[in-house]
């Protein structure tokens, strides 16, 4: 068994925090046990599945108890300051375990690797291994270096690495939902974000390998895939080699990839994350509308409703452009749910500009939102250019207003669905009772309904919605 802890969320690519107990995976055995924790976004979760695959292929077993592990890795997130503090506190706990087990190897993976490698390795001596997101293939060699008494580092970024040939170990393993990475890195230089510096330049994965992975998942019984990228709408892959007049090079964009994935089977649900307002096209929206199994749900981070603040954030769109994209979604996919990310208290944000964000929320009426106070990250463009000059008290007050407004909108959006029949993919039992199933609707809303003998996890159920909370729809199978 392996534990994967996902206790934080990121801008533009978010995952609810939860602890996941993972199934053991059969593999050759070298007698050593591996324990991984992952912090932050869905991409980190997906990366941990790649790491597990690489090391299980070398004979490692997995464990849910770090006290019996021979190798411990934390897959890190640098988006918010509290995530870094959690990682540092966790490493101190592992340092205590290392006193009891001197042969224990402790490592940091992912987004903190480059920026904090010297602190972790030399100043605080908390870890033995530091590995960046593009160097996971080197992990067996790095562990060998530590076994020989050295500290090991590889934080080199790549312009080519996509791990396309590695079959991820499905660590959450409910056998129903799976993440599929379609690209790595980011070319957007949002001034608040560290991702371009920690994950490198954008590169798209070969679509043939993506479709094969999704097809294999469907054949194994999975019924939902989420295509992952920092900015999925900028996915673009071109066939290698020179084109000739009779046979031009094949080029695949995100709309094409969505269609290819949807065509695997009408029983395979397709989701994706994350879209960028500057890149999402009508072609993508029409593709979503064309196929019933591409979910009517788009995560479209706004960050701010004010054009001046958006320019300072280097988001490369303004308020009017964002509204244009919202209007296009509402026109082309009327049933589509929309979620977002909001940052409040960005550098020099005025009260009037904060009100612009609230008015944007009123205009869109998001189904869901990830909401944050601005947290300055060292090395970002904002940290170099702008003073973090909004007092914490004001940030907190503005965040409270944003959260309250979103709760109103979430409740309104779900109330509108009372009396409708929603197609729900059953994921398992409700957290509160094994007498109820839970699953998500096409619009990504959580639905709870009584267990019936006609359905089991992994199947679709038509559920009549009878009532709702601010976050959950409740009904009965019909």
Image: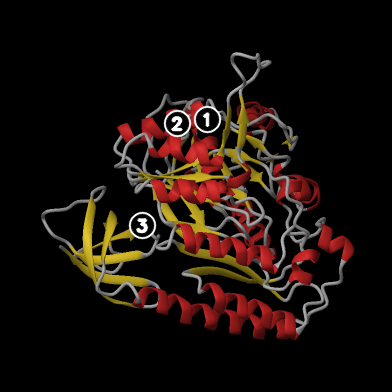
Tag 2: Cα neighbours inside 10 Å, few (<14), some, or many (≥20)? many
> Which residue, given by chain and number where applicable, does mark 1 sit on?
207
**Would residue 111 appear left or right of 348 to someone viewing this image?**
left
| Mark carried by residue 211 | 2
Say whether marks 2 and 1 touch (CB < 8 Å): yes
Between 92 and 408, the one lying in front of the other is 408
Query: In the picture, residue 345 is in which quadrant?
Result: bottom right
Residue at x-position 75% and y-position 70% = 307
Tag 1: Cα neighbours inside 10 Å, few (<14), some, or many (≥20)? many
**Would residue 431 appear left or right of 205 to someone viewing this image?**
left
Query: In the picture, residue 200 is in which quadrant?
Result: top right
| Mark carried by residue 442 | 3
Residue at x-position 58% and y-position 53% = 275
Whole-angstrom CA distance, mark 2 to mark 1, is 6 Å
- Residue 169 visible here: no
Between 422 and 77, the one lying in front of the other is 422
């Amino acid at each position: 068994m392996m534990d994967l802890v996902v206790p934080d969320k990121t801008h533009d690519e978010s995952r609810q925090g939860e602890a996941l107990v993972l199934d053991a995976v059969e593999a050759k055995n070298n007698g050593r046990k591996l324990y991984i924790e992952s912090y932050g976004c869905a991409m980190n979760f997906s990366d941990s599945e790649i790491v597990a695959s690489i090391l299980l292929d070398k004979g490692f077993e997995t464990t849910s108890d770090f006290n019996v592990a021979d190798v411990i890795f934390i897959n890190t997130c640098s988006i918010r300051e509290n995530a870094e503090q959690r990682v540092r506190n966790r490493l101190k706990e592992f340092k205590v375990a290392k006193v009891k087990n001197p042969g224990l190897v402790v490592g940091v993976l992912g987004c903190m690797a480059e920026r904090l490698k010297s602190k972790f390795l030399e100043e605080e001596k908390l870890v033995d291994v530091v590995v960046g997101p593009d160097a996971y293939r080197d992990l067996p060699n790095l562990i060998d270096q530590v076994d020989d008494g050295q500290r090991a580092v590889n934080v080199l970024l790549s312009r080519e690495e996509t791990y396309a040939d590695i079959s991820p170990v499905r660590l959450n393993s409910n056998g129903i939902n799976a993440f599929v990475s379609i690209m790595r890195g980011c070319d957007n230089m949002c001034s608040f974000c560290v991702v371009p510096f920690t994950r490198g330049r954008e590169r798209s994965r070969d679509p043939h390998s993506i479709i094969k992975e999704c097809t294999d998942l469907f054949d194994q019984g999975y019924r939902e895939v989420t295509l992952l990228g920092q900015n999925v709408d900028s996915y673009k892959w071109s066939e290698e080699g020179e084109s000739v007049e009779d046979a031009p090079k094949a080029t695949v964009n995100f709309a094409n990839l969505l269609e290819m994935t949807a065509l695997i089977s009408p029983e395979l649900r397709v989701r994706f994350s994350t879209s960028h307002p500057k890149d999402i096209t009508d072609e993508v929206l029409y593709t979503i509308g064309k196929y019933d199994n591409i979910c009517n749900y788009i995560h479209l981070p706004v960050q701010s409703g004010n054009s001046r603040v958006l320019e300072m954030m280097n988001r490369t769109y303004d308020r009017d452009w964002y509204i244009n994209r919202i209007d296009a979604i509402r026109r082309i996919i009327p049933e589509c749910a929309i979620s977002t990310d909001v940052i409040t208290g960005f550098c020099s944000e005025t009260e009037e500009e904060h009100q612009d964000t609230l008015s944007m929320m009123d205009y869109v009426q998001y189904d869901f939102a990830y909401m944050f106070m601005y947290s300055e990250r060292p090395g970002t463009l904002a940290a170099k250019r702008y003073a973090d000059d909004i007092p914490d008290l004001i940030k907190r007050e503005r965040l409270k207003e944003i959260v309250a407004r979103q709760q109103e909108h979430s409740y309104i959006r779900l109330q509108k669905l009372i009396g409708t029949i929603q197609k729900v993919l059953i994921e398992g039992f409700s957290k509160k009772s094994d007498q109820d199933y839970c699953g998500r609707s096409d619009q990504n809303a959580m639905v709870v309904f009584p267990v019936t003998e006609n359905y089991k996890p992994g199947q679709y159920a038509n559920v009549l919605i009878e009532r709702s909370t601010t976050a959950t729809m409740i009904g009965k199978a019909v």
